[in-house]
Amino acid sequence: MQNIKEKYQKEVIPTLKEKFGYKNNLAVPRIIKVVINTGFNPANRDKKAQGEIAEDLSAITGQKLVPCISKISEAGFKIRKGMTVGLKATLRGPKMYDFLDRLVNIALPRCRDFRGLPEKNIDQGGNLNIGIKEHIVFPEISTESAKNIFGFEISITTTAKTQEEGLELFKLLKFPIRIDKKKK
C-alpha cells in the first residue's frame, strides 16, 4: 500500500496540474500541517484525568502536547486565569504523513456509523476539519485500558486557494469524502 506522501508526489501532482492548469509543481495545493486539539470539560479538570488524556493523545500524535492556558477568568464557565483548558499538537513533515496514513486507513473506518466525511467539512480556503468523538478508534489506544473516552478535533491545513481545489486534493489522496447531493 502506498502512503500519502508517495501518492501525492506520483499521482496527485500530475493530475492537479492537468486539471487546474498549474505550470509549476510548487503551485499545486499540498498539505502544510495537521493540528490536533482537545478541550477539557469541567468533569475532567482534575490533574489525574488531564494526565491520562495527555498520555493518550501523545500516543496518537507521537509527540508531546502543548497545554492551552486560559488568559482570562470566566465565571460562567468556571474558568480561572492560568488554568489549563485544553491540549494541542501541530504535526508537520514525516509525523504528519504517518498520522494521516493512520487516520485515513485505520481510524476513520473504525468510527461507529461512518459513511464518509461530509463535503461541507472543507472550508472556503480548502482546509479540512474533522471531529473525532471517541479517541479509542486509533490503534495506539487499548480499549480495555482507556479510562476516559474523549473527543478531539483535527484541522488539516492546505495551500489550496478554493474549496474546489481542496476537495479535489483530498479526493485524490483517498480521503473518504462523501459528496452531498445539492438541493435544488
Image: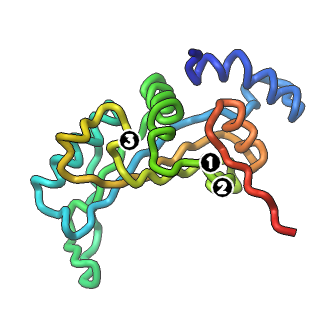
What amino acid type is highlighted by mark number 1?
A: Asn
Q: Which of pointers 1 and 3 lies earlier in the amino acid sequence? A: 1
Quadrant position of residue 86: bottom left
In the image, residue 129 lies at what x, y percent? Answer: 55, 51
Q: Nearer the viewer, residue 48 or 125?
A: 48
* Eye-nearest disc, 1 or 3: 3
What amino acid type is highlighted by mark number 3? Val
**Would you call the spot at circle 1 few (<14 residues within 10 Å), some (14-19), or many (20 or more)?**
many
Quarter of the C terminus within the rendering:
bottom right
Residue 123 located left or right of residue 62? right
Label 2 belongs to which residue?
123
Residue at the image point whose x is 72% and y is 44% from the top: 167
Describe the element under mark 1 as helix, strand or loop.
loop
Q: Secondary structure at mark 2?
A: loop
Query: How crowded is the residue under tag 2: few (<14 C-alpha within 10 Å), some, or many (20+)?
Result: some
Q: Please, is residue 111 above or below residue 138 in the view?
A: below
The answer to whether the residue labelled 2 contacts the one labelled 1, judged by CB atoms less than 8 Å apart, is: yes
Front of the two marks 3 and 2? 3
Tell me which label, 3 or 2, sits earlier in the chain.
2
CB contact under 8 Å: marks 3 and 2:
no
Distance in Å between CA atoms under marks 1 and 3: 23 Å
Residue 159 at x, y = what percent?
66, 40
- Residue at the outermost bottom position: 76
Count of numbered circles on the image: 3
Question: What is the x, y in percent for residue 103?
Answer: 48, 35
- Local SS, label 3: helix
Q: Where does label 1 land, which residue?
A: 127
Q: Quadrant of residue 157?
A: top right
Q: Which residue is mark 3?
A: 137
